[in-house]
Image: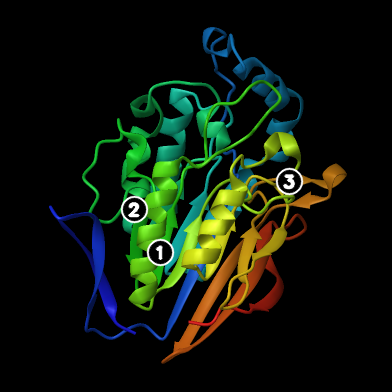
Amino acid sequence: MPDVKKETRPDNPEGTVHAVPSPTPESFTLAHISDLHLTSLNSTAITPLLNKRMLGYLSWWRKRRFVHRIEIVEALLEDLKTIRPDHIAVTGDLTHLGLPDEFTEAADWLSRLGPPDQVTVIPGNHEAYVGQKWSDQLTSWSAYLKSDEDQESLRNTGFFPSLRIRGPVALFGLCSARPSLPFLAVGSLDKRQLDKLSVLLQTTGDAGLLRVVLVHHPPVPGTIKWRKRLDNSTAFTELISRYGAELVLHGHTHAPTFAEVRTHAGNIPVVGAPSASELNPHARRCASYNLYMLKQNGENRQLMMRVRSYSEKSGRFEEDQATNLVLPRT
C-alpha cells in the first residue's frame, strides 16, 4: 500500500490525497483512550461555577473525584510507555467542567502522554460544558487537534474534521462537543464537518488507507440514553455507510460498547472505550483502554482489538481479552 500526502491547491481547497510510492509498515498499533477526567477542581473559585458548572462541580465533589483516580492515570502512562503503540487516540473528556485552568493542566498531561505527532485528541462534551470563546478552550491543545498541514487558527472551529495520516492509517478527528442545557450531555456534528468528512473519506479510501473516524459521542442511534445522544447520528451513519470507513471509535459512555454500521462492502465496527481512569465497583466500571493491532499483507488486512484493564490488586493495566474484528471489504 502506498504512503500518501495531502495537497491543497486554490482550485481544491479541501485537499486531495495523492499516493506517494514508499514502503508501508507491515503492522500498526493504535491505542484508544477516553474520558479520563484527569483534572483537579480543589482550588476552583466560586465565580466560574455560577452556571451549569455548579451541577458538574457538585457531581465531582460527591462522586467523580473518588472514582477517577490519579494513580490509575499514572499506571496508564506507564503501561503505554511499555506497550509503545505507533499512535494514541484520545476521544475527549480530559476535563470535568471545561475551565481554563483545567485545559492548562490537561495540556501538561498530554505532553507526558506523547508528542503531538504521536497523539491525536478530539474534544468531548465536558470541554464544552458552557458556551465560551473557542480560543479560550482549546488553544493549548492545538498541536494535538489539528490536521498534519492545518494552519487555521483555533478561533475558527471549522478546522474539524482533522485528518492525520500515519503509515497505513488515516485518522479523522470530529468535534461533537457543544454546550447543552443542565442535565443534558447532547452532541452534534454540523453540516460543514459532515460535508468535508465525505470528501476526505472518499479520497483516503481511493488511496487505500485504513480509515479510522474519531468522535466523542456514540454515533449509532440507540447506543446511549436520550439525554446523552448525538443529535444527528442518523446523518452520520448514512454518510459513513455511503462513503465508507474501516473503524469508528468513540467515548462518552464510560462503558465498553460495540455497534456496527451496515454498508454494501460489509459492516463497519463502531467501538466505544470506557473511561481509562475510572474505578467504580458500584457501577461495575473498571478503567480500561483498547489497542488495535493492524497487520496487512498486500490487500489482506487483519485487525485485532486487545483490551487492557486496570487491576487494583497489581496496580497495573493487564491484558483482559482479545478480539479479531471483521473489516469491510476494500
Foreground: 233 or 147?
Answer: 233
Residue 232 occupies quadrant: top right
How many angstroms separate mark 3 from mark 1 (CA)? 26 Å
> Earlier along the polypeptide chain: callout 2 or callout 3?
2
Q: Residue 201, labelled with which disc?
A: 1
Which mark sits nearer the N-terminus, 3 or 1? 1
Identify which amino acid the numbered label 1 is placed on.
Leu
Residue 321: image x %, image y %? 72, 73
Q: Left of 134 or right of it: where is 238? A: right
Instruction: State the quadrant of the N terminus.
Output: bottom left
Q: Which mark is residue 19?
A: none
Does the CB distance between marks 1 and 2 fall below 8 Å? no
324 relative position to 151: left or right: right
Closest to the camera, between mark 1 and mark 2, is 1
Q: Could you tell me the amino acid type at mark 2?
A: Pro
Q: Of circles 2 and 3, which is in front? A: 3
Instruction: Give whichever of 39, 181 is nearer the camera.
Output: 181
Q: Position of residue 328 (x, y in %)?
A: 56, 78
Circle 1 packing at 10 Å, graded few (<14), some (14-19), many (20+), is many
Q: Is residue 322 above or below residue 220?
A: below
Q: Which residue in the structure is indicated by mark 2?
A: 116
